[in-house]
Image (cartoon, rainbow, N blue to C red):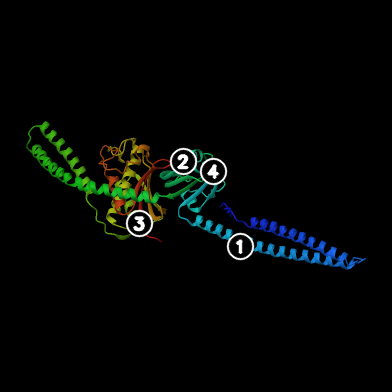
Amino acid sequence: MMTTQIQFSGSPRFFLSAGTFFMLAVFFGFLLVSYMFLRHLRAGLNKKEDTTGRPALAGETAFAAASVQAVIQKLREQERELERLRNVERERAQRTERLTDAVTRNMPTGLIVVGANSLVNLSNPAAEAALGVGALQYRRYTDLLGTDSALAELVGACLRQGQTFQRQEIDHRTAAGETRHLGVTISPVSMVEGKATGALCLMSDLTELTALQRQMRLKESLASLGEMSAGIAHEFKNSLATLCAYAQLIQQQSVSSDVAENAGKILSEARSLTHVVTEFLRFARPMELEGELLAMAPLVERVVAEGREIFPGVIFSSAGEFTDVAGDEGLLRQALLNLVRNAAEATLAQRAGTAPGTGTEKSDSPGFKPGGRVEVLGTIEDLAGRRMQRLGVRDDGPGIPAEDLSKVFLPFYTTKTSGTGLGLAIVQKIAVQHGGSAEAQNRPEGGAELILWLPAPTA
């Protein structure tokens, strides 16, 4: 950390120089007065016709020596006083420096000061934590932040043009690949001839706050969706039930095979719509959580066992670290089963050469290649300052197109021809109701990973 140099207008060096000059002036003035006095004394002695002159000379020498000794003593006393004052000022400056360092080091807001030479002259631990980089001092800010970083652009604009940026919100990607949402205020340290001598940057990590705001917005949108459409869906379901009844009646009473076939098609489509409406009602219905403390390891093993029964052509496994989670066992089981089912369908479709949900990816389908794998991996991680149970459901399927990663948990979004687009949306809703979240990502080695985050009790 840069040592702060503090200069006082009345410094000890100034006092010492002024005092020395003053004492020298006094000393030479005293010598001048002594000289005049000695001349007067010598003139008086000469009138006494002292032929040898030795007593007068000895008196003059002793008097001059005593005078010089007195002046030297005074100078020494003044020097000691000036040294005492210098020590007092030095101690005061050191106390101020220690206080400044302590305040800078312990302030919760990140602080970096970039000089006109583009080097970081001052930083604190909060800035290092927010940027995900250690040892910031005496390094070029573009090397630390990246030339294409939004934060580097703001600092550069401040240095070049003296611009001030107040309460800006930017996304910063750390060297570890994490995306941090930062709130920054940047201003010039001072301006000399229209140029900034440095840039002062204050920053706060808003990642956790942004995640909580996003979660609250998601909860509000889910509640609004349920309130607005549950009644409409219920009416749709009633109408579809009536349509199915009439189709069955036509099918039973018809003597023409064409009429019976068309009635069967109407009945099939009506049942498909009824299934969609039923799933939507389940999605829109408010969830009531039991709130019991659940051991995740047995629940994961149970879901994996169910996956083996439903998809015998897929190899299921579980590994990692699992802890207890407060939540509803039935809802968490449903969420995990939806994730496992989605992963199994993806890996089966990869081997059958078809899109998931087309109905041809079963283990007895022509061209099916066995060996698909689905793994449930559990870890305990710190996410935005919270201890979380991470449940990653991995598959070795084709992966998810990059443009679809942010959409897979949206209601009614699906790439399956026979899907409703509500399975993963229900997973997201269950996660949010438990204070967690769900996300999707592609694996570098191939395949996708759907992740369920759930709050874990503090260890």
In this rendering, the label closer to the viewer, 3 or 2: 2
Front-most of 151 and 220? 151
Instruction: Name the residue nearer the viewer: 216 or 377.
Output: 216
Please report whichever mark, 1 or 3, sits nearer to the chain's N-terminal start: 1
Q: CA separation, marks 1 and 3? A: 65 Å
For marks 4 and 2, give the CA distance.
12 Å
Asked if 265 appears above or below 293 in the picture, the reply is: above
**Few, some or many residues within 10 Å of mark 1 (<14, 14–19, 20+):** few
Relative to 151, is 294 on the left or the right?
left
Residue 33 horizontal/vertical position (percent): 76, 61
Q: Which residue is mark 1?
A: 88
Splitting the image into 4 quarters, where does residue 301 fall? bottom left
Disc 1 vs disc 2: which is toward the camera? Answer: 1
The CA distance from mark 4 to mark 1 is 32 Å
For the residues labelled 4 and 3, the Cα–Cα distance comes to: 57 Å
- The residue labelled by disc 2 is 163
Identify whether 168 is placed above or below 366. below
Q: Residue beneath label 3, please?
A: 296
* Residue contact between numbered discs 3 and 2, judged by CB atoms under 8 Å: no
